C-alpha cells in the first residue's frame, strides 16, 4: 500500500478491501484504549473549505488511535497569503507525522504528499472525496452484505468529487454504477471510457433508479461552485431522490447521502427522514472508515 490516500484510483481492490476489513475491526473494538498506534504522533488537519463530518471524524479518530490532532485553517496559515504548498509541505513534514487536507485543487494534495514525505490523506478536493466513498462502501457491506454484485444509482451532479470517486469505486469493485445527471454535469468522457461496462450515464432518473440496490445523492452546488448556484438549481430540477424515484428501486433499497443535505433540492424531506437511520449510520462510518485508512497506511 502506498503511504498516501489521495484517490481510490491509486489503490488496488485488495488494498481497499483491507481498509474496509480494518474499519470493521476497529468499529467492533471502539472504546478499547489499549490500541494506540498513533501514540506520540501529531497529525495536522489543513482545511480550506467548511466541514462538519470530515473534521470531527478525523479529529476523534486520530485521538482514539492515541495521537493528537491539530486543526489548521488555511486562511490563518501563510498558505492563505500565498506561501507555496511545497514550502508549507517541507516545513510541516519536519514537524507533524501525517496530514489530512481539504482543499480546492487536487494537485495541491499531490504536491503536499510529494514535498512533505509524510502520510497524506485527501479529505476532499474538487476532484475526489475518497474517504466519503470508503464510509459508503462500509455501509453497503454492513447493510447489504456485498458490494460487487450491486447496482448503485447516483442522482445529481455526476461531475462532482463524490460522483468521480464513485466511478473509481465501480472500476475497482466491479459493481454497476448508473449516473443520472443533466447534460453538462456528467463525468468526463475519458473517465467513462476508462470505466467501460461498469458505469452508465443517462438523463433519465426513473430508468436509472429502476431495480437499484442503492440510491445516492449529493448537493447540487458543491463548495466552490456558489457562483453557479442559480443556474445549477435550474438545471438540476428533477434530478432528485423523492418517493416516486424510491418506488422504482428495489424494495430493500438503501438511500444514502454524503451530507450535508438540502431538503427539497437533491432529496425530499420525507425520503430523508424515512431513511435517516441508514444515512446517519453512513455518516458515523466516516469515523470507522478513516481509522481503517490511517491504520492501513501505517501498516498497523
Ligand atoms: N460529507 C462530508 O464530507 O461532510 P463535511 O463537509 O461536513 O465534512
Ligand atoms: N460535492 C460536495 C460534497 C460535500 C461533502 C462538495 O464538494 O461540496
Image (tube, grey):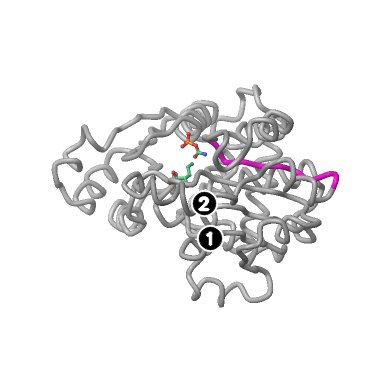
Task: Determine if residue 192 is in view.
Answer: yes
Residue 57 x, y percent position in the rendering: 52, 31
Tell me if 208 is positioned left or right of 8 in this view.
right
Q: Residue furthest right?
A: 251
Q: Residue at x 31, y 40 (%)?
A: 48
- Camera-nearest residue between 208 and 224: 208
Tell me if 151 is positioned left or right of 156 in this view.
right
Residue 41 found in image quarter: top left
Q: Which residue is mark 2?
A: 236
Residue 114 x, y percent position in the rendering: 32, 58
Tell me if residue 233 is in the magenta stretch: no
Give the answer, above or below, for where 48 lies relative to 105: above
Q: Residues within 10 Å of mark 2 (few under 14, many from 20)?
A: many
- Tell me the quadrant of the picture where the N terminus can be found: bottom right
Task: Determine if residue 1 is in view.
Answer: no
Q: Which residue is mark 1?
A: 182
Residue 280 - label: none
Q: Which residues are magenta?
A: 251-259
Mark 1 or 2 closer to N-term? 1
Q: Residue at x 70, y 35 (%)?
A: 271
- Tell me the quadrant of the picture where the C terminus can be found: top right
- Camera-nearest residue between 144 and 19: 144
Amino acid at each position: 500500500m502506498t503511504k498516501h490516500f489521495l484517490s481510490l484510483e491509486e489503490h488496488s481492490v485488495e488494498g481497499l478491501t483491507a481498509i474496509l476489513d480494518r474499519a470493521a475491526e476497529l468499529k467492533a473494538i471502539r472504546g478499547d484504549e489499549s490500541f494506540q498506534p498513533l501514540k506520540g504522533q501529531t497529525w495536522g488537519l489543513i482545511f480550506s473549505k467548511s466541514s462538519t463530518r470530515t473534521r470531527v471524524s478525523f479529529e476523534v479518530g486520530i485521538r482514539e488511535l492515541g495521537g493528537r490532532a491539530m486543526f489548521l485553517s488555511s486562511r490563518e496559515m501563510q498558505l492563505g497569503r500565498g506561501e507555496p504548498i511545497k514550502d508549507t509541505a517541507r516545513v510541516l513534514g519536519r514537524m507533524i507525522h501525517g496530514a489530512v487536507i481539504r482543499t480546492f485543487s487536487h494537485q495541491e494534495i499531490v504536491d503536499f504528499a510529494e514535498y512533505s514525505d509524510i502520510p497524506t490523506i485527501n479529505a476532499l478536493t474538487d476532484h475526489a472525496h475518497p474517504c466519503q466513498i470508503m464510509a459508503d462502501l462500509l455501509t453497503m457491506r454492513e447493510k447489504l452484505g456485498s458490494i460487487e454484485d450491486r447496482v448503485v444509482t447516483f442522482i445529481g451532479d455526476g461531475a462532482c468529487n463524490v460522483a468521480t470517486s464513485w466511478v473509481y469505486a465501480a472500476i475497482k469493485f466491479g459493481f454497476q454504477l448508473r449516473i443520472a445527471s443533466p447534460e453538462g454535469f456528467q463525468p468526463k468522457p475519458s473517465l467513462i471510457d476508462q470505466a467501460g461496462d461498469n458505469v452508465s450515464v443517462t438523463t433519465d432518473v426513473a430508468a436509472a433508479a429502476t431495480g437499484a440496490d442503492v440510491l445516492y445523492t449529493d448537493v447540487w452546488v458543491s463548495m466552490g461552485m456558489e457562483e453557479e448556484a442559480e443556474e445549477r438549481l435550474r438545471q438540476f430540477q428533477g434530478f432528485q431522490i423523492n418517493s416516486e424515484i424510491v418506488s422504482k428501486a428495489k424494495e430493500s433499497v438503501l438511500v444514502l447521502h454524503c451530507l450535508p443535505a438540502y431538503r427539497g433540492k437533491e432529496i425530499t424531506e420525507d425520503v430523508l427522514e424515512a431513511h435517516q437511520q441508514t444515512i446517519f449510520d453512513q455518516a458515523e462510518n466516516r469515523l470507522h472508515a478513516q481509522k481503517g485508512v490511517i491504520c492501513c497506511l501505517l501498516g498497523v
